[in-house]
Image: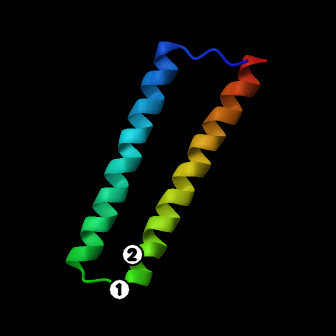
Amino acid sequence: MIVWSPGEIAVFSAVGLMIVLKLWTVWHVSIKAKANREGKMIFLGLIGGLALFGIGAKVYIGSMMAL
């Protein structure tokens, strides 16, 4: 079982807030640029996928270092 330190919880909170900010800014810029629905979904899908990959990598590396 992984024991989360306060520092790791703070990092995950900061990363979560950065992801939310990035998704909001991409959505806002796409609206201002009058992008169509497919364009918005492509950008949000890429940003979301990369964010999930980054979080997954951090969890995996953290669990491997804890062993």
In which quadrant of the rendered view does residue 43 lie?
bottom left
- The local secondary structure at tag 2 comes to helix
Up the image or down, 14 lies above or below 35; here it is above
Instruction: Report the side of 65 relative to 7 (left or right).
Output: right
Which residue is located at x 76 percent, y 26 percent? Answer: 64
**Quadrant (top left/top right/bottom left/bottom right) for the N terminus:** top right
Q: Counting other residues with Cα less than 10 Å from the Cα at mark 1, is it few (<14), some (14-19), or many (20 or more)?
A: few
In the rendered structure, are the residues bearing label 1 and label 2 in contact, judged by CB atoms less than 8 Å apart? yes
Q: Residue furthest right?
A: 67
Image coords of residue 57 (percent x, y): 65, 41
36 sits to left or right of 59: left
Q: How is the image coloured?
A: rainbow
**Spot occupied by residue 12 in the image (x, y as percentages of width and height):** 47, 31
Residue 61 in the image: above or below residue 19: above
Is residue 63 rendered to the left or right of residue 33? Answer: right
How crowded is the residue under tag 2: few (<14 C-alpha within 10 Å), some, or many (20+)?
some
Disc 1 residue type (three-letter): Asn
Marker disc for residue 12: none
**Residue shown at the point (25%, 75%) measured from the top left:** 31
Q: Quadrant of residue 23?
A: bottom left
Q: CA distance from mark 1 to mark 2?
A: 6 Å
What residue would you read off at disc 2? 40
| Residue name at image x 30 percent, y 58 percent | 24
Residue 56 versus residue 63 in the image, above or below = below
Instruction: State the SS at label 1.
Output: loop
* Amino acid type, mark 2: Lys
Image quadrant containing the C terminus: top right
Across the whole image, how many numbered discs are drawn on residues? 2
Determine which of the numbered discs, if any, sits on residue 36 in the image: 1
Q: Which residue is most to the left?
A: 32
